[in-house]
Image (cartoon, rainbow, N blue to C red):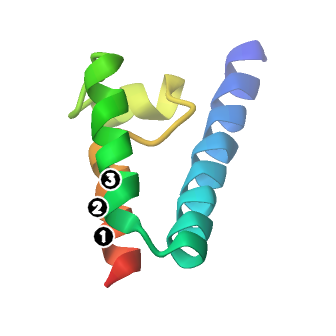
């Protein structure tokens, strides 16, 4: 049960992160600054840029950095 709760919580968390990115793009209108910040964070945290989708589904509370960047670029266009 704990694993199922964790997966569900992570799904909601990733959705919230995408919504927060969308809000930031629309409010601050500086998508390049957001992308730069995400790149810096991923370098500092040694993030895996291409995690396996199943690993993301099971254990990631945030979307992978490259997916967030792609989403931000799409929102900005």
Q: Secondary structure at mark 3?
A: helix
Residue 66 or residue 32, whichever sits in front: 32
* Residue drawn at x 31%, y 29% as measured from the top left: 42
Determine which residue is flagged by label 3: 35
Determine which quarter of the picture holds residue 32: bottom left
Determine which residue is flagged by label 2: 70
Q: What separation in Å lies between label 3 and label 2 (alpha carbons)?
A: 9 Å
Question: For mark 2, does the 10 Å Cα neighbourhood hold few (<14), some (14 to 19), or many (20 or more) residues?
Answer: few
Contact flag, marks 3 and 1 (Cβ < 8 Å): yes
Q: Relative to 14, is 77 on the left or the right?
A: left
Q: What separation in Å lies between label 3 and label 1 (alpha carbons)?
A: 9 Å
* Residue drawn at x 39%, y 25% as measured from the top left: 55
Q: Residue furthest bottom?
A: 77
Q: Position of residue 1 (x, y in %)?
A: 78, 17
Of the numbered discs in the image, which one, if any, rests on residue 73? 1
Q: Secondary structure at mark 1?
A: helix
Please report whichever mark, 3 or 1, sits nearer to the chain's N-terminal start. Answer: 3
């Amino acid at each position: 049960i704990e694993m199922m709760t964790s997966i569900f919580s992570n799904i909601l968390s990733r959705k919230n992160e995408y919504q927060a990115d969308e809000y930031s793009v629309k409010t601050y209108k500086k998508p390049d600054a957001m992308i730069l910040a995400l790149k810096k964070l991923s370098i500092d945290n040694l993030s895996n840029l291409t995690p396996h989708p199943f690993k993301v589904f099971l254990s990631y509370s945030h979307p992978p950095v490259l997916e967030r960047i792609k989403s931000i670029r799409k929102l900005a266009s």
